[in-house]
Image (tube, rainbow, N blue to C red):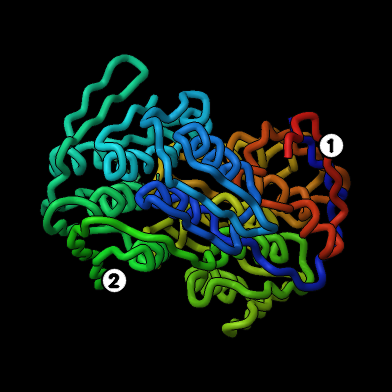
């Protein structure tokens, strides 16, 4: 259990540099399995999901080394195709190993993936896409056995523009026989980022950026080295931390143009926002407005991962705000905790309504998932007095140094940890 103790009511001031992107680096690490050589990823965040992926890669036979924030993955020998159940259950994104393992070993064994508790998270699109490419899938109780002696290119029209399914198809397609076309592919920035690595490894990919991707399979891939882009969700979380606590914060090295939807919302709330290629600056003084109505949408819309952190800010905004979650069900676990702080929140199916109050008070909150956990910390910054957030390690799955970063900005936050294995 990790306990965050927050002394709220202090404005934040200063600047910080944002970590590398979790959602970009995880599929890149899976991609490393596709080459009999090494992939070097700079600016890799030292977070628990990355450590979990490393344990899986080592189990499969890779050698993985760290040098600061550079991770070096040597996949010269891949001896196994079984993803250990313990790690697959910890991290839902382990499902992207399916495409990579099929490409490298022609088969994969995976227990049903786990991860954040945010409603039903099916993997039907991953499986049906791989089946279209020739994979045979057998499900036995907890395990899935997937094999494809020959992976063949196919035209795959995704019913939903799933990020993970798009990544899985890309990973399977780069070494498949023939051409794979993905229609209604996800447009999240993590997709061109994965394409950038795969191309550096020798893959032949045309990504038009409009939801159409064409991959011509090649015989083999080679070593590559790349710097991972900055994390857009961590960037957004820190901008929202400044909005929750008040003050002036500059985030350095943000992912250029990737948090536009959030910046538009912050401006609409009356905050001062400035964006350049080098930094994003946000300033919040005194009163600010709520958001009449906002829906989470696929990129470039407002990201579902910032829905709970935004709600934390709206608790003290002027007037009524309504947020509709359209990507995942049951993603209001953080919102269910907010009333403990004196907030006025009601949830009706996919819509969460907040009536802003002038003051919040400290309370003991329980974190149930990664971004929701971060949102509870933000709410604690906004509340007067002491807030305790009890977290079973969710926050460290995605934030390398949340408490240290917030402390640097002047937040009163300390952590006690009975699980630290880093
Ligand atoms: C990724 C991100 C996550 C983000 C999400 C949406 C990673 C590791 N995680 O998750 O942080 O919140 O994108 O931007 O990159 N769906 C199906 N069937 C499938 C797959 C998905 O119905 O086989 C549905 C999901 O239930 C959801 C929607 O498609 O409603 C989008 O999910 P998807 O884009 O796949 O999210 P992830 O890749 O899991």
Horizontal and vertical percent position of residue 146: 25, 30
Q: Name the foreground residue: 410 vs 217.
A: 217
Q: Is residue 306 above or below residue 371?
A: below
Residue 65 makes an appearance in the image: yes
Query: Residue at image x 20%, y 62%?
Result: 215
Q: Name the foreground residue: 69 vs 19.
A: 69
Horizontal and vertical percent position of residue 60: 45, 34
Q: Name the foreground residue: 400 vs 297.
A: 400
Residue receiving disc 2: 209
Give me the disc on residue 321.
none
Picture quadrant of residue 408: bottom right
Query: Residue at image x 60%, y 37%?
Result: 336
Q: Is residue 159 left or right of residue 10?
A: left
Q: Is residue 279 above or below residue 243?
A: below
- Helix, strand or loop under label 2: loop
- Helix, strand or loop under label 1: strand
Q: Is residue 415 left or right of residue 310?
A: right
What is the number of callouts on the image? Answer: 2
Give me the disc on residue 416.
1
Q: Is residue 177 above or below residue 52?
A: below
Dot placed on the residue nearer the N-terminal end, 2 or 1: 2
Q: What's the distance in space between the residues labelled 2 and 1, CA to CA?
A: 44 Å
Quarter of the image containing the C terminus? top right
Number of residues whose C-alpha sits closer than 10 Å to that of mark 2, classed few (under 14), some (14–19) or many (20 or more): some
Horizontal and vertical percent position of residue 414: 86, 46
């Amino acid at each position: 259990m990790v306990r965050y103790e927050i002394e709220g009511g202090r404005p934040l001031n200063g600047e910080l540099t944002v970590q590398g992107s979790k959602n970009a680096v995880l599929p890149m690490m899976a991609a490393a399995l596709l080459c009999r050589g090494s992939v070097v990823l700079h600016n890799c965040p030292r977070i628990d999901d990355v450590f979990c992926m490393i344990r899986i890669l080592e189990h499969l036979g890779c050698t993985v080394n760290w040098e600061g924030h550079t991770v070096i993955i040597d996949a010269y020998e891949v001896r196994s195709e079984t993803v250990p159940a313990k790690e697959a259950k910890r991290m839902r994104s382990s499902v992207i190993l399916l495409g990579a393992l099929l490409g490298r070993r022609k088969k994969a064994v995976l227990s049903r993936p786990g991860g954040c508790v945010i409603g039903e998270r099916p993997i039907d699109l991953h499986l049906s896409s791989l089946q279209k490419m020739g994979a045979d899938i057998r499900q036995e109780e907890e395990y899935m056995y997937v094999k494809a002696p020959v992976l063949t290119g196919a035209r795959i029209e995704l019913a939903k523009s799933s990020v993970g399914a798009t990544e899985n198809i890309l990973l399977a397609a780069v070494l498949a026989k023939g051409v794979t076309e993905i229609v209604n592919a996800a447009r999240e920035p993590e997709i061109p980022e994965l394409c950038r690595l795969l191309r550096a490894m020798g893959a032949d990919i045309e990504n038009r950026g409009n939801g159409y991707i064409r991959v011509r399979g090649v015989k083999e891939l080679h070593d590559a080295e790349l710097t991972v882009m900055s994390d857009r969700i961590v960037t957004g979380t820190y901008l929202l931390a400044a909005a929750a606590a008040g003050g002036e914060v500059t985030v350095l090295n943000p992912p250029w143009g990737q948090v536009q939807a959030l910046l538009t919302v912050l401006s609409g709330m009356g905050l001062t926002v400035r964006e350049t290629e080098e930094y994003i600056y946000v300033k919040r003084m005194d009163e600010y407005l709520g958001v009449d109505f906002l829906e989470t949408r696929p990129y470039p819309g407002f990201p579902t991962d910032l829905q709970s952190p935004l709600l934390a800010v709206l608790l003290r905004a002027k007037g009524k705000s309504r947020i509709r979650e359209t990507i995942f069900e049951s993603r209001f676990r953080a919102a269910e905790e907010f009333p403990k702080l004196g907030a006025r929140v009601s949830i009706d199916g996919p819509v969460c309504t907040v009536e802003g109050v002038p003051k919040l008070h400290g309370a003991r909150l329980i974190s149930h998932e990664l971004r929701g956990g971060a949102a509870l910390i933000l709410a604690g910054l906004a509340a007067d007095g002491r807030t305790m957030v009890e977290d079973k390690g969710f926050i460290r799955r995605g934030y390398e140094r949340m408490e240290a970063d917030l402390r640097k900005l002047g937040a009163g936050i300390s952590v006690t940890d009975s699980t630290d294995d880093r």
